Amino acid sequence: MKLSQLFTKTAKEAPADADSVNARLLTQAGFIQKQMAGVYNFLPLGLRVLNKIENIIREEMNAIGGQEMVMPALTQEESWQKTGRASLDILFHLQGQNDAKMVLNPTHEEVITPMMKRFIASYRDLPFAAYQFQVKFRNEARAKSGILRGREFPMKDLYSFHADEKDLDDYYEKVKAAYFKIYERVGLGEKTILTFASGGAFSKYSHEFQTFCEVGEDTIHLCEKCRVAVNADILQDQNSCPECGNKQLKPYKAVEVGNIFKLRTKFSEPFGLTYKDAKGQDHLVEMGCYGIGLSRLMGIIADIFNDDKGLMWPESVAPYKVHLIALENEPGVAKSAQKAYKELKERGIEVLFDDRPDVSAGEKFADADLIGLPIRVVVSKKTLQNKSVEIKGRHTDKMTLVGQDKLLKAIED
Ligand code: ATP
Ligand code: MG
């Protein structure tokens, strides 16, 4: 992508209403634009980050047998009455024509559970798991911390269906392992802690994945030995490490980046989702649900990986790998930079090319730091005197000159 073509622009000043580091940096760098509190536009650079996150999650969901589908944003309110959730504060209600009452889905148990009555009849139809990437709507009391808590936000939600509790338990462990892989791959592995949280109707706990972060709304109490934590919300019921009994737990601020639940029969019961066993007897289907907020992950990555100059994307989720700069507006420089751009692209390397003729070197460097791609490559009159280009990682001040013909190799190593 050429920067001269990209419609977004960076901004020198922080937006006045930015309430968090992620909102400030992502807005200044042109990744997102606020529509209203808790509602954001995801611009080309921001969408590329979301897509990277989405693909990592997709690969890990497919690896545990998840089948991708998409459910609607709208449901009939009646389904929410059935589960007793129609009066939840976070629901957005809509009035259709002819008095049709509808809800903008904040989650999809009320959609997927009745739908599966069409596909589950016998024990032979179980187990399976289905997931989607979909926009959720939640009338959050306080939409804040930039994209960490939105009123409209993309989520991956997976639902699993089982004949018995043992099978649900086994699959739940697989999802847990897949979640750890996801956090690892997006760069949050070391900072993300399995946390015991309140469970809801049928199980003692649910598990949250909490990422250490000062802006976090949650407090988790960490057992340093086991690297698991207890959410402050359930500390009264559980004031020691659930794994080793250690009572010396240490409080940290954290953000919930995922949540997995054993729903058991909480939803199969109101909707009558049953299957017949080998003897022809009916049983309620056991269910699990597993969510990850994509924009929240993007926000937390921005909150954690930055310095005073801007963003510092982990390579796995960076919108592009290389930020290529043609430093001076000079024919030789432009031609060599163009050639490097073409070579990198042909090699399948994602490049953002600052080819703008009328922008100063200082501004180009500042924009590269603000946007925060992992590798900066500069072509200038000076580098060309040595038939070379200059390479620098976003994480370091160390610059290396490499021969123009060695660029691809240097980037790939
Ligand atoms: P929280 O406790 O933060 O309000 P939740 O427990 O209601 O979240 P879930 O219903 O379990 O969240 O949703 C699954 C995931 O979706 C969460 O782990 C989080 O990553 C993300 N998420 C939840 N609410 C929001 C929101 N308002 N904006 C962005 N992401 C969200
Ligand atoms: Mg929660």
Image (cartoon, grey):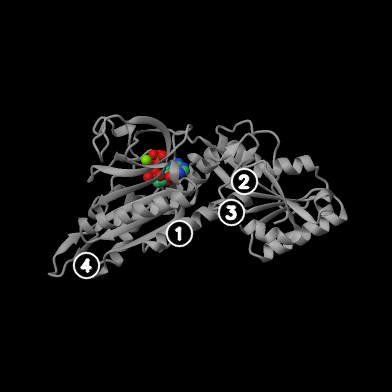
In the image, which is nearer the foreground, mark 2 or mark 1?
A: 1
**Which numbered disc covers residue 31?**
2
Visible residue check, residue 75: no
Quadrant including the C terminus: bottom right
SS category of the residue bearing label 4: helix
Q: Earlier in the sequence, mark 2 or mark 1?
A: 2
Q: Is residue 212 left or right of residue 86?
A: right
Query: The disc labelled 4 sits on which kind of residue?
Result: Tyr
Q: Give neighbour class at mark 4: few <14, some 14-19, many 20+ (Cα, 10 Å).
A: some
Q: Earlier in the sequence, mark 4 or mark 2?
A: 2
**Residue 24, horizontal then vertical, whole percent:** 60, 36
Please give the name of the residue rendered at 79% of the width and 43% of the height, measured from the top-left corner.
Answer: 361
SS category of the residue bearing label 1: helix
Query: The disc labelled 3 sits on which kind of residue?
Result: Arg
In the foreground, 330 or 9: 330
Query: The disc labelled 1 sits on which kind of residue?
Result: Arg
On the image, numbered disc 1 is attached to which residue?
58
The answer to whether the residues at label 1 and label 3 have Cβ atoms under 8 Å apart is no
On the image, numbered disc 4 is attached to which residue?
123
Q: Is residue 382 left or right of residue 238?
A: right
Please give the name of the residue rendered at 76% of the width and 59% of the height, measured from the top-left corner.
Answer: 404
Ligand 1 neighbours mark 3 (CB distance < 8 Å)? no
Please give the name of the residue rendered at 47% of the width and 35% of the height, measured from the top-left corner.
Answer: 213
Q: Is residue 78 left or right of residue 397?
A: left
Please give the name of the residue rendered at 20% of the width and 59% of the height, measured from the top-left corner.
Answer: 164
